[in-house]
Image: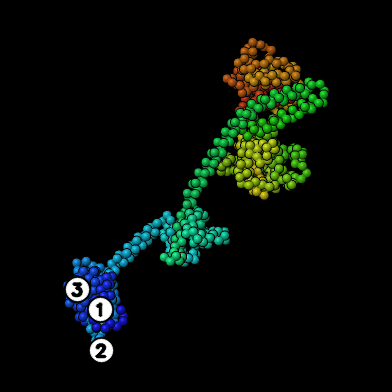
Amino acid sequence: MNKKNTPETPSNYDRLLIDAITDYAIYMLDPEGRVSNWNTGAQRFKGYKPEEIIGQNFSRFYTPEDQAAGLPQRFLEISARTGSFEGEGWRVRKDGSRFWAHVVIDPIRDQTGKLVGFAKITRDLTERRQAEEKLRQSQEQFRLLVQGVTDYAIYMLDPEGRVTNWNPGAERIKGYKPEEIIGAHFSKFYRPEDRQNNEPQKSLDTAITQGKFEKEGWRVRKDGTHFWAHVVIDAIRDETGKLIGFAKITRDITEKMKTQQALDQTREALFHSQKTEAIGRLTGGIAHDFNNLLMVIIGSLRLLQRRVPNDPKISTLVDNALQGAERGTVLIQRMLAFARRQDLKQEVINLPILVQGMTNLLGHTLGSAVSIATKFPPQLPSVIADANQLESALLNLVVNARDAMPDGGKITISAQQVTVTQPGPVKPGTYVCLVVSDSGEGMDEDTLRRATEPFFTTKGVGKGTGLGLSMVQGLAEQFGGQFVLKSQKGKGTTAELWLPTGGPQQMHTPAKSTSPELIQSAPLTILVVDDDALVLQNVTNMLEELGHTVVPANAAIKAYDILCARDDINLVITDQVMPRITGLQLGEMIQAKWANLPVIIATGYAEISEATQLRFTRLAKPFTQEDLRKAISQSIMAKT
Ligand SMILES: Nc1ncnc2c1ncn2[C@@H]1O[C@H](COP(=O)(O)OP(=O)(O)OP(=O)(O)O)[C@@H](O)[C@H]1O
Ligand SMILES: [Mg+2]
């Protein structure tokens, strides 16, 4: 409208055009500001018909305040002086309502340059203004909302990843004040290794290509500490689709993660202990029954070995059967050890000596490709354990190491003293940590986690029982120590067996100076008590072969009746686990009445305490004829 207008009345064509315009009020004023014509648009949004308004001063369209301030007249002056006036403001309709108007006033001059009036174009911007106001309000609300959030870091990045704003949540979580961080690149919040992997840019790229990026990971605070963050990045684009930046929302979920982890661990531990417990009970039960059966088999085979005529064909068969049965015994011992049901001796053991004693055995087991080295400090305290069991634990660790080094390698057995001050997996105290390490293939995470599980083996059916490490762990825990396995795939394995130190030295020395082996007992009359007919028969056979006379009884109460009825019994051998009255109870009944009658209790269980051990002779199942002979000598000696 900056074109010079002419005073001529518009042509018909122009008139039609102007009247057709309904979105703009287009009208003219005379030099004093009186309305001289009026189009349809003007009528539509100011509400006056042409006849009502033509000749009236245009100041009536202004609010009383603006009129009082002389604005209408001033605008005309500006227009006349500068060639145009343009502005926005409130105007008043005929019905008194207001609307927000955009106004242009152009002066109209004749050829001589004399002012003949004004052309006025007004547009109703109320809707646009309302929309703008709404937008402003919502932006303000949004700003307040974002600024009010302290649990989430909410901020924006420019397309290059520089921080452009920062809310209090971001300040609280990350530790930077807005002025310290705005303008900095957001990769600052990543750990150096993540930056090296280009994680920051990768996450922006994902947001660009997929619209959104969401992930959890470690982030770094201003003070350098780490937190576990849940991060969402959204790409922001303008209407044309051009990327104008990113919205980033970060939440500190370290606590949540830790709680979850603790929960998972507890659940895992509980599950593991329940599983082990269940398998332990099952294994213990089976092993106990099997123990009895093996005793029968071995006992009978031994007798057979001596009774059959000297025929090599038969004796080889018997030898084979015996060997098989003896291997079964080793397996059973392991099962009992893992099930913590085994009858353990508490011996004071000097580890270097024990290992020294095994050198031969280990050498045979390992073959020439594997070398073995031992490293013991000069001042190593002794440990409390069962020497036989400890040997078999050590043997298993060494065999495991050998199996992990099919192409040969080196095994190191070492030990060191460790003092524990804080209660943890083991009680505070001093321990000796016996270490078997190898340079073998190691274990992946999954194998390592499962290695001590009973029956877990990677060695294939018939090659490994998977009970080796379970047994080692059972042994360590039964003595109040622990078993720790460390390994990485391809980097070898270290197995640590922690055992408590010390203990009274006299446990090592036999109670009597004469060795029981030297005493050959005279023929005795022995009462044998066992609820298992097979076992009873087997023990009877062994005893008779040793020259003794046997009186059998299949229950404690029957044994007691026999004792009351006869006075020629020299010794009682009873099984511990029997229905109703146990071997131990029977032993106590006998002691009460016949204090000098020796009693031997045969048991495969670890449940008989030290105190009882002093009063009765114990015989660990399964036992050989030789074990039986020794136990008899020992019990007779104890009563003399
Ligand atoms: N030193 C080691 N290096 C690599 N893997 C090992 C080592 N020790 C144990 N393992 C892994 O742990 C599993 C369980 O060992 P564990 O001694 O309990 O049973 P096993 O050796 O398989 O069977 P068994 O002891 O009856 O011969 C092994 O099968 C093997 O996968
Ligand atoms: Mg093994």
Residue displayed at 72% across by 37% down: 354
Report helix, strand or loop for mark 3: helix
Residue displayed at 69% across by 36% down: 462
Residue displayed at 21% across by 66% down: 97
Q: Which residue is mark 2?
A: 112
Compare marks 2 and 3 and give the one earlier in the sequence.
3
Residue 446 placement (x, y as % from top left): 61, 45
Q: Which residue is mark 3?
A: 50
**On the picture, is 508 further left or further right than 78?**
right
Compare marks 3 and 1 and give the one earlier in the sequence.
1
In this view, the residue farthest toward the bottom is 112
Q: Nearer the viewer, residue 572 or 202?
A: 202
Q: Quadrant of residue 565?
A: top right
Q: CA distance from mark 2 to mark 3?
A: 30 Å
Q: Which residue is mark 1?
A: 12
**Quarter containing ligand 1?**
top right
Res. 426 in view: yes
Res. 222 in view: no
Residues at discs 2 and 3 in contact (Cβ within 8 Å): no
Type of residue at label 3? Answer: Pro
Q: Quadrant of the N terminus?
A: bottom left
* Cβ at disc 1 under 8 Å from ligand 1: no
